[in-house]
Image: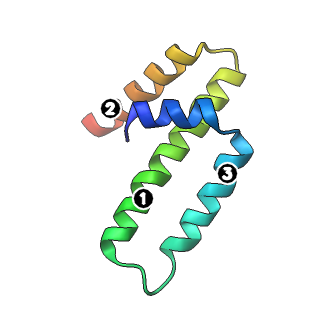
Amino acid sequence: MKIPVIKQLFQNATPAQLETTLEVLEAFCEFRGVSEHEVDVAGEMITNICGALEVHQMVSDGAVEKDALNAFGQKVMGSIDR
């Protein structure tokens, strides 16, 4: 997870675009010929896309972009610390 990447995705892609990309990446990971390294890279991209989708949701619920990004980062870091 990289907050600058999530911010860029949030600012430059609609939720519909992110959802479509997420579906493609998930399907890609299911192909038999995909290497472990490729799955790792796609997994990182999936994580960032999911983060951007969550930030979109928080902003649509009334949060300020900066606060939504910080809240998402804290949520993730909090789950890692458990």
| Image point (57%, 18%), residue name | 65
Q: Is residue 24 visible?
A: yes
Q: Quadrant of the N terminus?
A: top left
Q: Amino acid at mark 1?
A: Gly
Q: Earlier in the sequence, mark 1 or mark 3?
A: 3
2 or 3: mark nearer the eye: 3
Left or right relative to 49: residue 73: left
Residue 62's mark?
none
Q: Amino acid at mark 3?
A: Glu
Left or right relative to 73: residue 23: right
Q: Kindly identify which residue carries mark 2.
A: 77
Q: Kindly identify which residue carries mark 1.
A: 43
**Local secondary structure at mark 1:** helix
Q: Is residue 82 visible?
A: no
Q: Earlier in the sequence, mark 2 or mark 1?
A: 1
Instruction: Give coordinates of residue 8: x percent, y percent.
Output: 52, 33
Q: Quadrant of the C terminus?
A: top left
**The quadrant where residue 20 appears:** bottom right
Q: Nearer the viewer, residue 29 or 74?
A: 29
Left or right relative to 56: residue 48: left
| Image point (70%, 41%), residue name | 15
Q: Few, some or many C-alpha atoms within 10 Å of disc 3 (few <14, some 14-19, many ≥20)? A: some
Measured in 3D between alpha carbons, the distance from the residue under mark 2 to the one under mark 3, in whole angstroms, is 24 Å
Q: Amino acid at mark 2?
A: Met
Instruction: Give coordinates of residue 6: x percent, y percent.
Output: 48, 35
Instruction: Give coordinates of residue 42: x percent, y percent.
Output: 44, 61
| Image point (46%, 48%), residue name | 47
Q: Earlier in the sequence, mark 2 or mark 3?
A: 3
Q: Kindly identify which residue carries mark 3.
A: 19
Query: Where 51 sits versus 28, above or below?
Result: above
